[in-house]
Image (cartoon, helix red, strand yellow):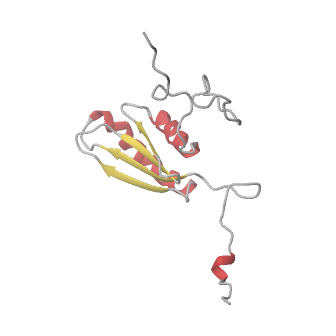
Amino acid sequence: MRGLLRASLRSRPANGHSAYLPQIRKLVFEYCDKWPTSATTRAYIDSHITSLAASNPHVEIVVKQRNQNEPIVRGFYVNNRDKVIPLKSLEITAIQQKVQLLLDSSGAKIVPLKRRTVESTTESPRGIWSGLHADRPSL
């Protein structure tokens, strides 16, 4: 008989009544050092990135130079998805709003609320129709 290991008795953290785990795990700011469209992004990084990192200790924040490209911010989530938002010529307050949007997002795919497909709990009495199994019309 095998004994129980102490590590196997731990519970895994999950979102629920007493705990909340943010879904974002990493933010990557990418900008060009020379392009004028990256000027406000550079100013945001110089003045706000330390306070952003201090207020969100659960998020890894990376700043990368991306020469000859427009500035972007990319959010990586625990469900292995990412979201990219361009920051081209945005004001500092707009950049803050976009970063907050990524922080508050879950990383899930956007699902349209209109025209959802009908899903039935019971199977069709006739079965699934397929053009491959239909009788050929006789002439």
Q: Nearer the viewer, residue 137 or 92?
A: 137
Quarter of the image for the N terminus: give it: bottom right
User: x%, y% of residue 69?
Assistant: 27, 39
Please tell me which residue is depicted at 53% across the width and 36% down the height of the picture: 97
User: x%, y% of residue 74?
Assistant: 42, 45
User: x%, y% of residue 64?
Assistant: 33, 51
Relative horizontal placement of residue 74, taking residue 122 as reference (left or right): left
Relative horizontal placement of residue 19, taking residue 60 as reference (left or right): right
Q: Which residue is outermost to the bottom?
A: 1
Quarter of the image for the C terminus: give it: top left
| Residue 69 against residue 75 in the figure, above or below | above
Q: Quadrant of residue 57?
A: bottom right
User: x%, y% of residue 18?
Assistant: 76, 58
Q: Quadrant of residue 124?
A: top right
Number of marks in the rendered image:
0
Q: Nearer the viewer, residue 74 or 113?
A: 113
Please tell me which residue is depicted at 57% across the width and 51% down the height of the picture: 23
Q: Which residue is outermost to the top?
A: 139
Q: Which residue is outermost to the front?
A: 139
| Residue 59 against residue 30 in the figure, above or below | below
Please tell me which residue is depicted at 68% across the width and 84% down the height of the picture: 4
Q: Nearer the viewer, residue 100 or 134?
A: 134
Please tell me which residue is depicted at 31% across the width and 33% down the height of the picture: 37
Q: Nearer the viewer, residue 74 or 127?
A: 127
| Residue 20 against residue 122 in the figure, above or below | below
Relative horizontal placement of residue 29, taking residue 21 as reference (left or right): left
